[in-house]
Image (tube, rainbow, N blue to C red):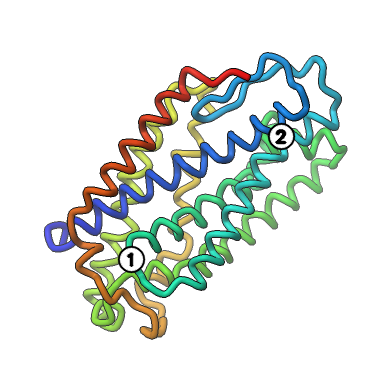
Amino acid sequence: MIKEYRFVIINSSLLFVIATILEMTLHECAHFIAAWQLHAANLSLHHNYVNYGDENLTTSKRIIIASAGPFISLLIGIAFQFICSRMQPRNLFFLFNLYMSVFGYIGFFGYLMIAPMFAGGDTGFVMRATGFPMWCIILIAIAGGFILYLLMKSLTKYFVEMGSEELIINPDQRKKFIHALMQYPLYIGIIITTVLNLPVPVLLSLIAPVFSPFTLMWSYGDALIKPYTSQHFNKNFKQLNSFSPMLIFVLFVVIAVNRYLVHGIYA
């Protein structure tokens, strides 16, 4: 199976990494721009965090800065899901849009889910700074997890539609294809993105790249067996299961930017 769909695994893994790192960078850029607009001192943008001095900032300004990242992630999730709903070709660009939507939603609802445990995180800080009681924070976290579950289920059909009509209809072939498209890239992508998150300011920062992508598996059973219509399917499956120099180039650019940001951009 690995040999039969080896380029499906490779291409999906590359798009997983590209979308994850791009979404994370945009998330941090939102924090950076908000902090810059609010005249935060000693401001710098890094690969997975923004550093600034908050001694000259009011609590309201700190809330705005902390909220900016998750807000942009939510917009990314919504925008790219909308693109997927309107896009007809099920090609590599479609799969990129799909991964961007997935990780955009994770970048918002994932932060809601961990808010009760991490007071220093984006949403954890915002909720405590605005006076939310712990029982309310826990309820919001549960609701965020449930909404993310529903969103993952709504996006699952698009992964299935990356297969040819024959693959969608044939149960055995479909299972092999979904393993190649979703499961193996999940493991490969987590390893690569975790490495690209290094160095981290605190070890707990690795929780997100290591564990949050597993939300993709919440609806994995649907991808394997749910009888989705084959009205939309990949009419050029060969592209998905072929070597793509363009993806290699894009990955190189993304990694280069990621490594450059390790040293920081200072405002």
Residue 91 is labelled as: 1
Q: How far across and down, in percent of the image, does residue 30 sit? A: 64, 37
Give the quadrant of residue 9.
bottom left
Give the quadrant of residue 42.
top right
| Mark 2, other Cα within 10 Å: few <14 / some 14–19 / many ≥20 | many
Q: In this view, does 200 lie to the left or right of 75?
A: left
Q: How far across and down, in percent of the image, does residue 17 sit? A: 37, 44
Q: How far across and down, in percent of the image, does residue 48 sit? A: 52, 30
Which residue lies under the disc numbered 2? 66
Report the front residue among 235 and 5.
Answer: 235
| Mark 1, other Cα within 10 Å: few <14 / some 14–19 / many ≥20 | many
| Figure label count | 2
- Look at discs 1 and 2 and give the one toward the viewer: 1
Q: Quadrant of the C terminus?
A: top right
Q: Which SS class for mark 1?
A: loop
For image coordinates 47% across by 42% down, the residue present is: 22
Q: Is residue 175 above or below residue 198?
A: below
Choose the circle earlier in sequence order: 1 or 2.
Answer: 2
